[in-house]
Amino acid sequence: VHAQGIEVKSASFNAGDDYYVLEAQFDIALTHTLEEALNKGVSLYFLLEFELIRPRWYCSNERVIGFSQQHRLSYNALTRQYRSGDRQSSS
Amino acid sequence: MSFSSLAEALEVMSRVSRRQDVEPGTIRREHYTAGIRMRLDTSQLAEAVPIERARFARVVYRLGLVQVAGDPRDVAAMTGAPVKAPAWLRYVLVLVVALAASRSFLLATATAITTLFAQRYPDIARIERRSGFRARAARRVSAVYLATQASLAVFGSQLTRDLLSCLRSSESCLAH
């Protein structure tokens, strides 16, 4: 993998009276250096961030929903397995 | 979760599906702006890969806020788009620039014809005071608005920051 960056391929947001559903698909491309670092045991942390804002012309915008979720990607050389896990915080 | 290949791990990580309960009435039938992005958390990236830290830090600005038009309860899709300043703000800025340019031009022309300039100096001074006040007021309103936006925006628009620094520098230049 030689490309770089993370692009949004698609995203959708649907809301009901007391819930919302967020779905998204990203295109994650790691550089060769990052992949090499990962394979040598360096953990990579990715941050997913979302926010829904109500624009207000008379005042500052209101942040209705916002959260960030951290994904950890690591490689275990002994088991030759990649591991991913996440931790999230909302506001 | 464990994966035997990196491609598998990235594939799973790249899919986001989240359902969250919120207080009833939190999301109303109004227009909203939504933004989503995923980025490499460079603050957690080991010092061993400093070049990558810089490169991915720039990628952050590639994904901005996206406008969700229509009914927020039935938004089918969001597509990536750069953040834009509101239309009225752009008009105000264009007006301010046009006023400033025409003022400079008129003053330059007037000062080139010294006799006429001397005759019309009181009129020029009066117009200058009026237009100067309006331009300063418009600039300050724009600056306050942009500063508010910049302080609130998690994803921060590069355009907002550029405009803000431009306005601030023009204010300080004019003040001297």
Image (cartoon, helix red, strand yellow):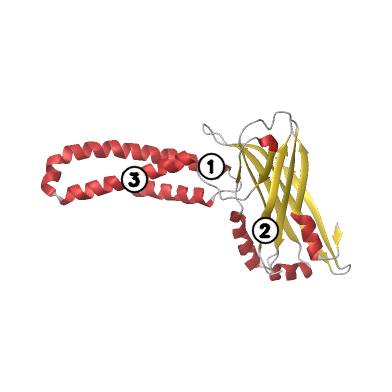
Residue at the disc numbered 3: B98
Residue at the image position 80 percent from the left and 60 percent from the top:
B9
Disc 1 + disc 3, Cβ < 8 Å? no
Residue A27: image location, x then y, percent: 70, 58
Q: Quadrant of the N terminus of chain A?
A: bottom right
Mark 3 vs mark 2: same chain?
A: no
Instruction: Pick whichever of labels 1 and 3 is earlier in the sequence.
Output: 3
Task: Find numbered disc 3 in the image and state the secondary structure of the residue it sits on.
Answer: helix
Q: Identify the element where label 2 is drawn.
A: strand
Q: Which mark is residue A6?
A: 2
Q: CA distance from mark 1 to mark 2?
A: 25 Å
Quarter of the image where one finds residue B28: top right
Real-space Cα distance between discs 1 and 3? Answer: 24 Å
Q: Which residue was labeled with disc 1? A: B149
Farthest residue, direction left: B115
Q: Nearer the viewer, residue B16 or B54?
A: B16
* Residue A86 in the image, given as x and y percentages of width and height: 79, 52
Q: Are marks 1 and 3 on the same chain?
A: yes
Chain for mark 2? Answer: A
For residue B6, side relative to residue B71 (left or right): right
